Structures are given as C-alpha cells and as structure tokens.
Amino acid sequence: MICTTDFRGASTVGEAMLHRPKVFTAAATVAEVRALFDDDHVHAALIVDGATLLSVVERADLDGLCGASPAWRAGRLAGRTVRAEADLFETWQGMRCRRLAVVTEDGQLVGLLCLKRSGRGFCTDADVAARAREKSGGTAEAAAGRIG
C-alpha cells in the first residue's frame, strides 16, 4: 500500500509546526495536566520556564503519580523534541509519537509539530483555530483563548 503525504509544500519542521502551542509553567501539577488530556486531540503537554522547554509530558507519563506532584518531573525531552531546521520528511519517517516540541539549540520552545491522526500530514495553526471555534460555539473571541 502506498502512503501519500500532504506536507502542504513544507520542507522543514519550522514550516509545518504550530506557532502558538498551549504551554504550562513549571508550577503545573499532575492533576492540571491530566485535565488537559481529557481532550482526545491532546497528546502532549509542554512545560516551560519562561521560554525554555523543561519537559514534554505524555498521558502515560502520569500513570500512578500523585495529582499534587509537579508535572514537569513526569516528562522528558529526549526523543520528544526536534529543531525547526530539521528536514520534515526525515522527521516524519522517524516519528515515534504524534507530537514533537520544536526547540532552538539552547532549548527555547518555538513550536509544536503535530502529526495528524491519519499520519499523512501535520496540523496547521488554522486547523487548531477551527477546532477551537467549534468547541467555543463559533465565536472568534472565545476561540482566541484556546490557542497559544
């Protein structure tokens, strides 16, 4: 079976990434991040200190942890980050999870690469905005609070 991809003309991760991913601060608890995962579109939580990415937390990372614990300790960076200048096709071929945090050389978070459920393309900022509008009843003002 041939798998076709739709990278919408992008050749680097930076061209395909979401530019305003939702983030949590280092103060976020396991319980707060668990609540984020109530949305089945969410596959990773990004924990930052300022602009520096501390941790990428996935659902399974939280299993068995106390809700009051700091969430950033549950996640990791290894295998969950990529640089913006990385080749998109090579990154796609090597992806072991559907979300990769996009970081600079010094660990600053610049975006999120989100593989679509089909595995053949990446979510766009417009896709995320449309989903937020649907959830908020269609108003742009309500949707704005869900992005970024």
Image (cartoon, rainbow, N blue to C red):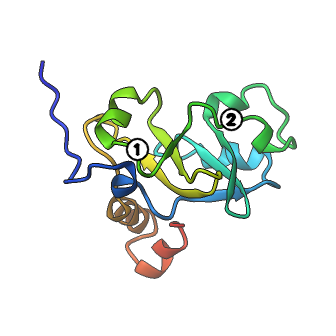
Q: Residue at x 43, y 58 (%)?
A: 18
Label at residue 63? none
The relative height of residue 21 versus residue 70 in the rendered view (above or below) is: below
Assess disc 2: are there few (<14), some (14-19) or many (≥20) residues with their C-alpha within 10 Å of its C-alpha: some
The relative height of residue 147 versus residue 63 in the rendered view (above or below) is: below
Distance from Cα at disc 1 to Cα at disc 2: 20 Å
Query: In front: 133, or 48?
Result: 48
Query: In front: 31, or 45?
Result: 45
Query: In front: 82, or 44?
Result: 82
**Disc 2 marks which residue?**
76
Does label 1 or label 2 sit earlier along the sequence?
2
User: Are circles 1 and 2 on residues that touch, CB within 8 Å?
Assistant: no
Query: Which kind of residue does numbered mark 2 sit on?
Result: Arg
Residue 63 horizontal/vertical position (percent): 72, 26
**Which element carries disc 1, helix, strand or loop?**
loop
**Disc 1 marks which residue?**
86
**Which element carries disc 2, helix, strand or loop?**
loop
